[in-house]
Image (cartoon, rainbow, N blue to C red):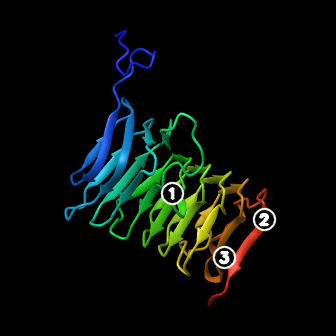
Amino acid sequence: DGLDNNCDGDVDEACPVEHCGYISADETWSASEPHVITCTVYVSDSTGPLLTIEDGAEVTFGAGAVLYVGYPGYGDIEVQGTSSGVLFTSAQSSPAPGDYYGLYLYSYTSGATDIEGLTIEYAGQGAGALYMYLADPEVRDSTIRYSGAAGFYSYYGEPTFTGTEFSDNDGSGIECYTSTCLDETADSFADNTITGNGGFAASLYANHVGALAASSSFAGNDNEGITVRGGTV
């Protein structure tokens, strides 16, 4: 009680926990201590470790840092931001879009990957702040903002989004590089908001337009509308 554990002038704060390298066994990042990703972190092993991030946790990323899940081996992430939320942000004193890469989900994730109440801000040093390659998790009640590129970038995969905001990103809110991008189930992209982005609300192939529900909003971007790429419906 009364101690300034991390010497920042505030009392009763825990010392930051630094993360770098491989997470090869189940691990939980608690909300009771700040977390700092100092380099590339891989949630990856032949056993399929699960990284659990508790509600209220804050994770800061150093310059150029990235969190890979399901690459190069098996791995999953569960973000439990059900009440206070979970924050991924820049470790820079004056944060700016593109300070770090962001959260990258790859093909060796499984049904255990689940994201709720996650805010990703100031990422997007690569293609997007939230990047998926052959991954199809559920993303609920989350926010992707201030990316230096797209908010969400997909290279194959069929994720679903509900109650999520893509705002004030330098690129489009959603950028689909391939013909597989969203769950093709009707209304699998529901109750979402895409606004304030530097590109289009979304750029996706024709076979995914049916996933966009009328309950979502696509207005207020630099290029109004949705880019529909060619393809077979």
What mark, if any, has residue 223 been given in the picture?
2
Indicate the secondary structure of the residue bearing disc 3: helix
Indicate the secondary structure of the residue bearing disc 1: strand
- Is disc 1 surrounded by few (<14), some (14 to 19) or many (20+) residues within 10 Å? many
Q: Amino acid at mark 1?
A: Val
- Give the number of marks: 3
What mark, if any, has residue 209 been given in the picture?
3
159 on left or right of 73: right
| Distance Cα–Cα, label 1 vs label 3 | 18 Å
- In the image, residue 222 above or below residue 9: below
Residue 144: horizontal and vertical position, in percent? 58, 52
Q: Residue at x 61, y 73 (%)?
A: 186
- Is disc 2 surrounded by few (<14), some (14 to 19) or many (20+) residues within 10 Å? some
Residue 154: horizontal and vertical position, in percent? 52, 69
91 on left or right of 39: right
Q: Nearer the viewer, mark 1 or mark 2?
A: 2
Answer yes or no: do the residues labelled 2 and 3 have beta carbons within 8 Å? no
- Is disc 3 surrounded by few (<14), some (14 to 19) or many (20+) residues within 10 Å? many
Residue 17: horizontal and vertical position, in percent? 32, 35
Precedes in sequence: disc 1 or disc 2: 1
What mark, if any, has residue 182 been given in the picture?
none
Q: Nearer the viewer, residue 204 or 93?
A: 93
Name the residue tied to disc 1.
139
